[in-house]
Amino acid sequence: MRKAPAKVLEPTDLCRVLKNVQKQRYPKRNTVIILLSFKAGLRACEIAGLDWTMVLQSDYTVGEQIYVSANIAKKGSKRFIPMHEDLRKALTILHKRSKSPKEGAIIVSERGRCNMTAGAVVNYFGALYQELGLSGCSSHSGRRTFITNAAKAITQAGGSLRDVQELAGHRALTTTERYIQGDREAQRKLITMI
């Protein structure tokens, strides 16, 4: 039997998550973890493997895109993702707080000596969602929310599902389609327009 897909979060749930993060021990780092998932659609392994060189410009300030290199992407699907402004601000704050490194892991362990592992990122999300009583959520919820929201908004941006597929780093559009949650209200509106 196939496992149920990770729950897509509503905007109010994301606000609750971000508010909760501010009470945690490492709020700046943890805000970046959340936003990398929800505003860039990164997988846990990509969040864990992300390096400052992948987000910094030549002047060592946070740039306008994320480079997900083949060595951290699933199946080597490297890609560039435009940087959401909220994520850019959070990364800039974390960069300054981290003494403006030119390289090295963005998401470091509690001791600050090495990058968090993908398993630690997965566990972080699991504990966070459990604490907030958000059942059905996992480390993939942010990614699935990102892909669903991108699919809903893509026609307004003048794009297609192919653009969402590329942002997600999927080789096949059928994989991207499995991430997109349907919207019954939108379906009702669509039927009235036909």
Image (cartoon, helix red, strand yellow):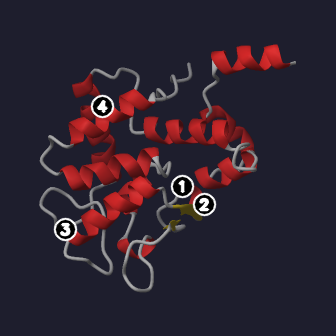
Kindly identify the amino acid type of the residue bearing the numbered disc 3: Arg
The answer to whether the residues at label 3 and label 2 have Cβ atoms under 8 Å apart is no
Q: Which residue is mark 4?
A: 16
Front residue (pair 156, 87): 156
**Residue 142: percent from left, percent from top:** 44, 39
Query: Which residue position holds label 3?
Result: 97
Q: Residue at x 52, y 68 (%)?
A: 69
Three-letter code, disc 2: Ser
Q: Is residue 140 left or right of residue 169?
A: left
Which residue corresponds to the image point at 35% horizontal and 60% vertical from the top-left? 89
Q: Earlier in the sequence, mark 4 or mark 3?
A: 4
Picture coordinates of residue 60, whole percent (x, y):
37, 82
Circle nearer the N terminus (4, 2): 4
Count of picture labels: 4
- How crowded pointer 2 is (Cα within 10 Å; few <14, some 14-19, many 20+) is rated as some
Q: Which residue is mark 1?
A: 74
